[in-house]
Amino acid sequence: MSQEHAPHIHITPLWIYIAVFLALAAGTLLTWYASTLELGALNTPVALLIATTKAILVILFFMHAIHSTRLTWVVIIGSFLWLGTLFVLTFADYLTRHWAIY
Amino acid sequence: MSDVTEHGHGHHPFLQHHFEDLGQQHEASTLAMWGFLATEILFFGGVLMAYWVYRISYPEAWALGAHQQNTMYGGLNTIVLIISSLTMALAVRNAQLGSSRGTVLMLILTLIFGSTFLGIKMIEYHMHYTEGLFPGTHWNPMLSEHARHVLTMHPELGPKLQLFMVFYWGMTGLHAVHMVIGAGLLIWMIWRAAKNHFGPEYYGPVEVMGLYWHFVDIVWIFLFPFLYLIPGAHT
C-alpha cells in the first residue's frame, strides 16, 4: 500500500437530499396534525412511528449510513440494540409493578 | 495537489502518519465518530427513558405541561433545524465535489439556521420564565393563565407539572448545549474550508462534523413531539 488511496467517495445526487428534506418537513407537519386528532391510545405510537421514520431517513441519507462500511453498520445497529436493552429491561420492571392499565 | 511538497516528504498534508492512506484515515474517523455517537445515543436515551417512566406515571401532568408550550415556535424550530441539516449535508457534498466556496456558503447557512433555532429557543425560555415555569425557588405556575385555570381545579398536579418542566428544561437545555458546541465546530470548519483544506480526497472533518450536527437534529425530532405534542385533557 505505497500508493495513496483517496476515500471511496459516494456523492449523493442533489435530488435525494432535497427529497429527504421534503419528507422530513412533511413528517413534521404530519406529527403536528396527528397530535390534533383524537386517536386515543394510538396517538403515542403514531408520534413515535413518525419520529422514528424521520430519524431513519436522516441516518441513512444525511449521515450516509447507506454507503458506510459494514463495521460502521455494526456500531450503528449495536448502539440502538443497547438503547433497546435499556428500555426493555427498565419497562419490564416499571410496567409490571402494579396491576394497572397503562 | 500543490500542497504536497509543503509537508516535505511527499504525501497529502493532512494524512496522519499512522494511517496507510487517506481512505483508511477517512474510514477510521467516520467509525470513531459513530462510536462517540453511540455514547450520545445512550446519554440522551437515559434521559428519554426517565421521561417515559414519569410520563406513564403522570399522564395528566404531562399533557398539562405540553400545553404550556407554544407549538408554533416548536414546529417552526423543527423546520429550521431540518433546513440546517439539509445545508450541512450540502456542505459535505460541496467538499466532495471540491468546491471550497460552496462548502463555506453551506456551512455559513448552517450556522445561520442553527443560530436562528437557538434564538427562537431563547424567546421560548423567556416566556416560560416570566410565566413562573422555571422549577425551583422561582416556580410559580399560577402566573401562567392556562396552568392556573387547571391547577385551581386540580392542585395535586402542581408538583408533577414542575417535574415535567424539569424534564423540559433539562432535555431542551442539553440539546441547546449540543447546538452551541456544534456552532463552534461550524466556525472552525468554515475557517478550514475558506483556507482550501478540503477537497474530494480529504473532507473527513466536514463529514464527521455533519454526523454530529445530524445527530443533534435527530434528538430534536424526538423532543418536539415528546415535549410539545402530548394529547390529553387540555381544557
Image (cartoon, rainbow, N blue to C red):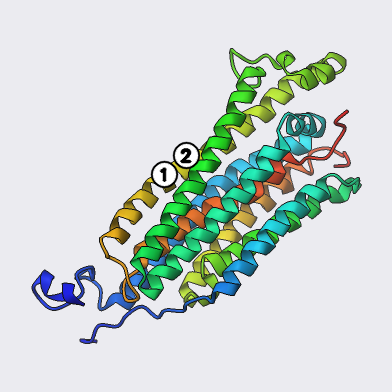
Residue A50 makes an appearance in the image: yes
Q: If the image is split into quadrants, where does the C terminus of chain B sit? A: top right
**Residue B227: which numbered mark, if any?**
none
Q: How many marks?
A: 2
State the SS at label 1.
helix
Residue at left offset 53%, top offset 42% = B116
- Is A15 displayed left or right of B71 in the figure? left
In three-dimensional space, the C-alpha distance between marks 1 and 2, rounded to whole angstroms, equals: 6 Å
**Residue B181: which numbered mark, if any?**
1
Q: Quadrant of residue B150?
A: top right
Q: Which residue is mark 2?
A: B177
Circles 1 and 2, Cβ within 8 Å, touching? The answer is: yes
> What chain does badge 2 belong to?
B
State the SS at label 2.
helix
Q: Residues within 10 Å of mark 2 (few under 14, many from 20)?
A: few
Q: Nearer the viewer, residue B118 or A49?
A: B118
Residue at left offset 53%, top offset 70% = A65
Residue at left offset 24%, top offset 87% = A1
